[in-house]
Amino acid sequence: MDIRVHQGFLKRIAPVPNMSATKFLHPILRGLKPLPEGHAEELQQIKEWMKGQQHLPYISDEYIFLFLYSNYFKVSETKETIEHYFTLRATSGADLFTNRDPLAPKNKAALDITHMVAFPNKTAEGYNVLFYRLSDYDYSKLNFADAVRVFCMFNDVKLSEDQGQAEGYIVIFDMKGCSLGHLTRVTLPALRAFMHYIQNAHPARLKKIHVVHTVSFINQVMCLVKPLIHSNLLNLLNFSSEGPESVVDKALLPEDFGGPLPSVKKLHEEQRKNMEENYREWLIESEIFKTDEKKRIKKPSKGMFASFTSSFKSLDID
C-alpha cells in the first residue's frame, strides 16, 4: 500500500505542525474518501473564525470538515461543536481525555469487562451500527470513568476508520448483566462529561440510540441521567426488553443474536487488537488536541458543563 495514503489520512485526523507524520502512522485498509465538494465557503468561514480563537489548537482543513460534515455544513452549529469538543478535552476534570494508552492497566481492565464493537455491515440507509455491552457482570470490577474514557477512545478510532464521513450512526447499548450494583459505580463528574460529549461535542451524525435488554430498574437509571439529557437526544432513545434483533436487521448481527457474523467476543477482540496495535501511538498523541485556557479571551459560562444550558448542536432526527 502507498505510505503517502496513510500519512495523508493521519494528517486529516491528527494534524500537528512541525511534527513528523510518521509519528501517527498506522495502516488503513481502504483508500481515502474525497472531501465533500461545494463547501469551500463554509470551510473558509470556520477557518477565519478559528484565527480569532487563540485558545483553540491548530487543525487542518480536513479536520475542520469532520465537524462541518457532522453538522450538515451548518456554520454556527459547527463552531459550537468545535468549541465544546476541544474545551471538554481540556477541562472535563474526569480524566476522560488523558491517559489514553490502550495498554495502560486501567484501560485494559475496562476493555476486559466490556465488549465495544462496530458491526462490519451498514443498515439499508447506510448507517453504521455500534454495539456496547458488559462482558463481565461483576459490578465491583467497573470503574465508570475508565469505561467512559475507553468508550471515547473507541469512538475516536471508529471516526478515524470511517474518515469522518459516515452517513450516520445507530448505537445499541445492551443492558444484559447490568445490576443496581453497577448503578452505584456511576460517578457524577464522569457521567456529566460523557453526556456533554455525546450531545454537544461528538462530531458524528447520531441517528438512533437503542437500549436493549432493558432492566427492571431502568426508571432509576433514567432519573439519574434525564436531568442531563436534552429533548433532542431523548427523541433518539428507544427502549426494548428484547435483544438487538428487535431493533436492527438480523443480517447485520453476530451469531450471538442469530445473525451471520462472528461472535461479539471475536469482533471485540479483533477491534481491540486494532486499537492496541495500530492506533496506540495515535491515541496517546491525540491528547494534545485541546484548548489552551490561558489563551482564551472570553471565559466560557459557568453553566457550560454543569447544566448544559449552552446551545445544543443540531441533530438530524429521522
Image (cartoon, helix red, strand yellow):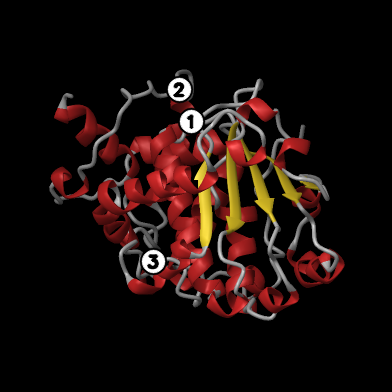
Which residue is label 1 attached to? 165
The quadrant holding residue 128 is: top right
Which is closer to the viewer, label 2 or label 3? Answer: 3
Nearest to the observer: residue 76 or residue 126 = 126
The answer to the question of whether label 2 and label 1 lie on touching residues, with beta carbons closer than 8 A, is yes
Q: Position of residue 277 (x, y in %)?
A: 26, 50
Q: Mark 3 to mark 1: distance in Å?
A: 29 Å
Let me know if residue 243 appears in the view.
Answer: yes
Within the image, what quadrant is residue 266 found in? top left
| Dot 1 amino acid type | Gln
Q: Position of residue 66 (x, y in %)?
A: 45, 38
Judge whether 229 appears above or below 217 on screen.
above
Closer to the camera: disc 3 or disc 1?
3
Which label number is shown at residue 108?
3
Which label sits on residue 36? Answer: 2
Q: Which mark is residue 254?
A: none
Looking at this view, is 109 or 167 the one in front? 109
Q: CA distance from mark 2 to mark 1?
A: 9 Å
Residue nearest the observer in this picture, 55 or 120: 120
Comes first in the chain, label 3 or label 1: 3
Of the residues shown, which amino acid type is indicated by label 3?
A: Lys
Q: Secondary structure at mark 3?
A: helix
Query: Residue at the spot x=71%, y=41% of the render?
Result: 244
